[in-house]
Image (tube, grey):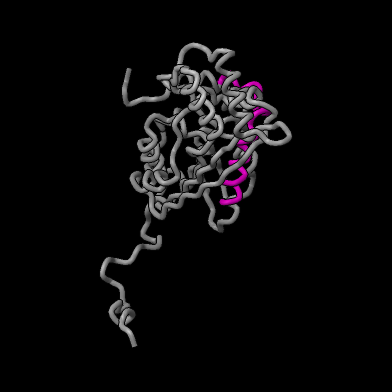
Amino acid sequence: MDNSKIFNRALYRSRRLRAADAWKRHDFLKREAAERLAECLADMTRAFPLALDLGCHQGDFGQIIGSRGGIKTLIQCDHAEKVVRGAEGVRLVSDEEFLPFAPNIFDLVVSVLSLHHVNDLPGTLIQIHGCLKPDGLFLAVLPGASTLTELRKSITHVSAEHGFALSPRLSPLIEVRDAGALLQRAGFALPVVDSDMLTVEYDNILKLMHDLRGMGESNVLLERQKNFTTRTQLAAIADYYQTHFGRADGTIPASFEFITMTGWKPHTSQQQPAKRGSGKVNLKQILEKN
């Protein structure tokens, strides 16, 4: 096994394929994130003649953005063929880990909740940077590390308390403090990172897990536990979840963190930081007492 890899991409693809037929019943997170990116683009006055939606699922972003955002042509790609068939317009099958695009071709690359199961995220960001034109924009939403914090804490506590094997059940996700550094490492200028929380109410933990399966987001870690969670384990996790996070009306909250990443491919027209030592203000004069 390649120790540099933590996700089983073939399994992730099969989970996405399995979820394709019922995707529209479980796409609310994708559409919410796509709405936020569409609003960001709508606030910009510039045009993006050729854009790429990387990990398009069934074309949610393309349906939402429509004629907004200055996009003339949107290329939609996903690594699961059956999934991308649900998109309309120009579409192709492509793995996010191995982009087939020429250098300096796109004015805009967007990705909506599709890069969190890439084994080499820095490498994928470098590839995205390469296929953008100078002064091209990268705009993405990734699930952050605070996503499903209630479920993570419930699993960890119950596993320790009851002596269950603490095997990886939920994917590691990006920390907001690391997102900006990743953009800079990939060569992006003017990086901006924002974090926002969305809380979804569920009747019980089984409905939460049903939604996660419907999104194709069940466990795809290479080191995952291969056998199923037992009824005893699931009951203990559900009880802890309800006791420590449940609402007065009996529902449970599920937190989803949206980390929005914005970066531009460098260009001479962009605002540049002042050279070190070029300041015109005399700090000594400011600090001197009258």
Location of residue 35 with respect to 149 vertically, above or below: below
* Farthest residue, direction bottom: 290
Where is residue 202? Give x, y as percent. 67, 31
Q: Main secondary structure of the magenta part?
A: helix
Identify the residue at horizontal 37%, vertical 43% (top origin).
182
- Point out the image quarter for the N terminus: top left
Left or right relative to 117: residue 199: right
- Whether 40 is drawn above or below 214: the answer is below
Identity of the residue drawn at 36% across and 48% down: 184
- Looking at the image, residue 233 sits to the left or right of residue 202; the answer is left
Q: Is residue 75 visible?
A: no
Quadrant where the C terminus is found in the figure: bottom left
- Pick whichever, 32 or 154, lies toward us: 154
> What range of the chain is rendered magenta?
17-40
Q: Is residue 87 above or below residue 40?
A: above
Residue ID at (54%, 38%): 112
Q: Residue at x 53, y 13 (%)?
A: 228
Q: Is residue 18 above or below residue 28?
A: above
User: Which of 145 and 117 lies nearest the eye of the viewer?
Assistant: 145
Q: Position of residue 223 (x, y in %)?
A: 40, 19
Image coords of residue 137 (percent x, y): 46, 49
Residue at the left extreme of this rendering: 277
Task: Tell me the quarter of the picture where residue 281 sits.
Answer: bottom left
Q: Position of residue 178 (x, y in %)?
A: 39, 44
Residue 26 seen by the camera: yes
User: Residue 274 colored magenta?
Assistant: no
